Amino acid sequence: MSKIKVEMTINGDKIEGSVEPRTLLIHFLREDLNLTGPHIGCDTSHCGACTIDLNGKSIKSCTVFAVQANGAEITTIESIAGADGTLHALQESFREHHGLQCGFCTPGMITRAHRLLQDNPNPTDSEIRYGISGNLCRCTGYQNIVKAIRVAAEQLNPAQEAAE
Amino acid sequence: MIPGSFDYHRPDSIEAAIGLLASLGDEARVVAGGHSLIPMMKLRMATPEHLVDLQDITSLRGITINGAEISIGAMTTQAELIASDQLAAVCPILGLAAAQIADPQVRNMGTIGGNIANGDPGNDMPALMQALDAVYILQGPEGRRDVAARDFYEAAYFTALEEGEILTAARFSAPPSGHGHAYEKQKRKIGDYATAAAAVVLTVENNSCQTAAIALTNVGDTPLYAEEASQILRGSNLDKKTITAAANAAKAITDPAEDGRGPANFRTHIAGIMVMRAIEKAIERAK
């Protein structure tokens, strides 16, 4: 089967690639573009370790073909920290509040939380839990993840208000 | 897991998609959100030689409400059903049920068309469509035909959809203003299919049930429209005895598989509980 040319905007950069139709988006990101932040966990669209933003929506990149994302705008965990390496408030908060143990789910978890806070800047704890229900963590029991997201939201809100 | 090889097509009109299916034959499959098909392809339980991606066909997207008539394009995502205030105003059960499907990421990709056309008895939207007495619009090389949701499902993964046809929309009349509704779903965890689930839509006037429709998810080879159970509610005063009788009538038509969700008789029992809870919640919501 012949390869297909694809173009996407990933983390603000226009990229071009050539993929077999069966290439999953997660493999294109990790293997062709060396964006290894999004992880392959369950590979069955359950765990959410491969979560990225596709056209402003959280999706699981293990269950999308790269060709389906031709022309799309993508954000991965790699672009969430500042260009100089300064951690985003969410990342800082996960570190401060022990929102991770082994860290495997963390890129997907933070990428999902990042989108959640854009859609709902001031979520309740139950909205946070519902919002991250597509991301599994087998270490923390979620308590500290929810706390980390809540604290990050509290920090981001005054910053947003000041900017307005 | 790497799917088998295939050729990829992304037509920009329904005519082009139908033309592709006609020329590519039975080795072609359409893909909507892909969240049923792609996992099956990764397991190599589905090995289509051609995928026809419908994402660029804008006429398949969106919710159109014209008076009481509602049309939902096949490519409308579950997340869009949840987010639609217009839909929530006239037929809130759809958004509330969509919020019980899978998880946020999956709902951003998964579409109503895929959910109802796939014929998976675990999918939630088919029972809702049966409770709402929806009609599916099918388009194919011979033109358009309409099939009622209550007649569409033949067996697990077997539907009235003929080779070369595409389900383009679901249409139904909004239940009367003030109707009661509920979709009660028991599942083991987020992302799981229902152990059993029940959709109920009813109207009540002077403590008397005027209209009622009950349908069940994942307790048979197909979604099940429970006509006898619905009939028991109509004209009744919806007391506890009537609700129990309706639940028993609904249980009588179930034939669930024994699987990780439990033995068959357990799932039938849960179906009865879901029916009772859905009726009670629908009564509370009815005005």
Image (cartoon, coloured by chain):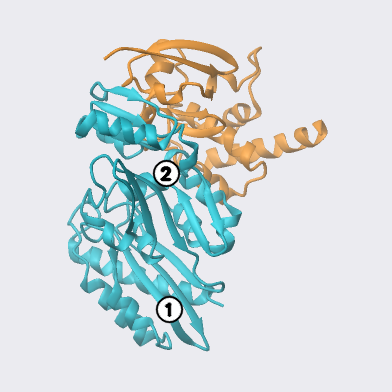
Residue B229 picture location, percent across and down: 30, 77
Q: In which quarter of the image is the C terminus of chain A?
A: top right
On the image, which quarter does residue A85 sit in?
top right
A133 relative to B205, above or below: above
Residue at 63% x, 46% y: name it: A123
Q: In which quarter of the image is the N terminus of chain A?
A: top left
Ranked by sequence position, the earlier of labels 2 and 1 is 2
Query: Label 2 belongs to which residue?
Result: B111
Residue B26 picture location, percent across and down: 20, 34
- What's the distance in space between the residues labelled 2 and 1, CA to CA? 29 Å
B122 relative to A142, above or below: below
Residue at 38% x, 37% y: name it: B32
On the image, which quarter does residue B184 sit in?
bottom left
Disc 2 chain ID: B
Residue at 62% x, 27% y: name it: A92
Query: Label 1 belongs to which residue?
Result: B211
Q: Which chain is orange?
A: A
Residue placed most toward the observer, A18 or A26? A18
Residue B75 picture location, percent across and down: 44, 42
Query: The disc labelled 1 sits on which kind of residue?
Result: Thr
Q: The cyan chain is which one?
A: B
- The answer to whether residue A122 of the structure is visible from this angle is yes
Query: The disc labelled 2 sits on which kind of residue?
Result: Thr
Disc 1 chain ID: B
A164 relative to B274, above or below: above
Residue B144 picture location, percent across and down: 35, 49
B199 relative to A72, above or below: below
- The answer to whether residue A99 of the structure is visible from this angle is no
Relative to A107, B8 lies left or right: left
